[in-house]
Amino acid sequence: MTTIQTARKTQATPVLDIERIRADFPILKLQVNGKPLVYLDNAASSQMPRQVIDRLVRYQSTQHANINRAVHTLSEIATNEFEGARRKLQHFIHAREEREVIFTSGTTDAINLVMHGYGRKFIGRGDEIILTTLEHHSNIVPWQMLAEEKGATIRVVPINDAGELLIDDYEKLFNERTKFVSVMHVSNALGTINPIKQMIDFAHVHGVPVLVDGAQAAPHMSVDVQDLDCDFYAFSGHKLCGPTGIGILYGKAALLERMQPFKGGGDMILSVTFEKTTYNTIPHKFEAGTPPIAAAIGLGAAVDYLSAIGMDAIHAHELSLLHYASEQMARLLGVRIIGTAEHKAAVLSFVVDGVHPHDIGTLLNEEGIAVRTGHHCAQPVMQRFKLPATSRASFAFYNNMAEVDALIAGIRTVQKVFL
Amino acid sequence: MADSRALYQEVILDHNKKPRNYGVLEQPSHHAAGHNPLCGDHIEVTLNLDGECIASIAFQGAACAICKASASMMTVAVKGKTRTEAETLIHEFTDMATGKLDLSGDHHIGRLVVFAGIADLPVRVKCAILPWHTLRAAFNAVENMSTEAEHDPMHVTIGDA
């Protein structure tokens, strides 16, 4: 078992060689509708560098067997590689121990695990769960299911017109019935970076544990779960240059130990008789059945790739894309940016006067530009802004300024069609 | 690969900008609301049947250009037609939008042919057919009215988001 300390970063942020990075991503060479692909739907899912693709091929070609079972060579190699991936993820989020890193199928699965494992055991009738207006449906619906089952109540932190959480209102929601806080780190619909460290500190004063939905944060900035002191942190592999079907739930060991298992099956047990089953230790208690071994190893390769570039450098480059795109978009008449928080990640939601987002999406696609249009699985956010939908450009470190220019030109084209 | 720009041609953009028969009829004999949860599109259709004939029809709602133009052109196409004729057109339009209609054969599509290209844009098919599904729901609504929203036959939902 490895124990790592939180290291403070003192080095200056290096400037990225974006063109060299882009060469790592085979899909970025694609043409869509006869135009070079401009992929700006990274908040939905990111693309995969050949280093990760190659790792998947190598695993599947030379290392695959089931893990934690047989004594044969391949099973031992696969087990070692799988557990090695866990250690890579541990270091990536600066977790104290590797057993605090649980492989799930994604963020949704991780949140559901906490709802079942922690919520169903420790939250009861009359208890209160704090969520925020910004939450993705995946961090709303599980808690509503729990509230319905247990007779608990959901309390919601409101936002201002910029899309920032009202922290005073958050603090006022706490009372002796408050049992859990679940909040996203970065808003997928608006890009707002929430002050989660401050929110976690406040919750802890009241003895309330906090789950952070890090799906939109972990791929874009350095995450230190020990520094944040969050109780749970969830994120997905496929938004982080990894494969789909894999994600991470970080949980403090002491909490994970007290939780009940989510899914029952093989691997999560020490012994089974028809009279009594003894559960395995963490993290295995929460990893029933054969996990997506290749995806976990692929995700390990993805965090190696990102770490080699440096999360701080990634964050800095993405912010420069965001600032440039926001500036350019602000100059377009009839275009309004939705979500203008002071602290924002590289997510740009916008509406165009007189043009429905779906029409924008279809016409931008004609220019080879991939954006998301719709409610972004965050209908409460759309209701707050009284919009049925927005268009959303979301950036990754492999995007460049020329792609921002293509987006802006694309929006101008859309406006011309609808003139 | 379909050229979706071709879909956004003059007639569709015109109906989007200046929708015909826009509004709600007072005391209609038939009405229904259609909703596409995927994109938030919402269309309301009201109509008056005079015997078998569609004497008047109107629509209103918040929707994308494809949906709005489809609704506008639908009201123009079915006004003055019999219910049976309108039902045939609903069937033909839905088939055309999903690429199942032989446009060289017998049909009553007429100017609605501008929507033929939607068949090449699967994610937008629902936008085009929402008004037609809503019209069908309006026709079928009177026989079995319900006050429960979930089972309301006058409320049609398209999409799975």
Image: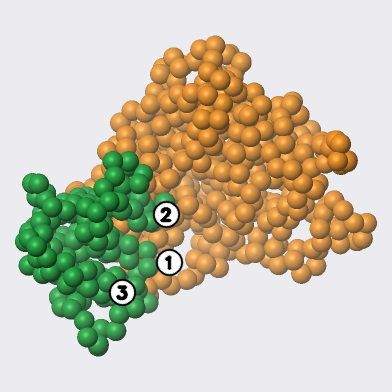
Q: Colour of chain A?
A: orange
Q: CA distance from mark 1 to mark 3?
A: 32 Å
Disc 1: host chain? A
In front: B76, or A221? B76
Measured along the vertical axis of the image, is residue A20 above or below residue A240?
Answer: below
The residue located at (52%, 28%) in the rendering is A147
Label 1: state its secondary structure.
loop
Label 2: state its secondary structure.
loop
Examine the image and state in which quarter residue A381 appears: top left
The residue located at (12%, 56%) in the rendering is B47
Name the residue carrying label 2.
B160
Q: Residues at marks 3 and 2, common chain? A: yes
Measured along the vertical axis of the image, is residue A157 above or below residue B73?
Answer: above
Residue A417 pos. (x, y %): 19, 64
Query: Which is closer to the viewer, label 1 or label 2?
Result: 2
Question: Is residue A191 among the parts visible in the rendering?
Answer: yes
Q: Colour of chain B?
A: green
Q: Amino acid at mark 2?
A: Asp
The residue located at (16%, 66%) in the rendering is B83
Q: CA distance from mark 1 to mark 2?
A: 28 Å
Name the residue carrying label 3.
B95
In the picture, the quarter occupied by the N terminus of chain B is bottom left
Count of picture labels: 3
Disc 2: host chain? B
Q: Residues within 10 Å of mark 1 (few under 14, many from 20)?
A: some
Name the residue carrying label 1.
A37
Outermost residue to the bottom: B104
Residue A282 pos. (x, y %): 78, 36
Q: Residues within 10 Å of mark 2 (few under 14, many from 20)?
A: few
In front: A328, or A196? A196
Label 3: state its secondary structure.
helix
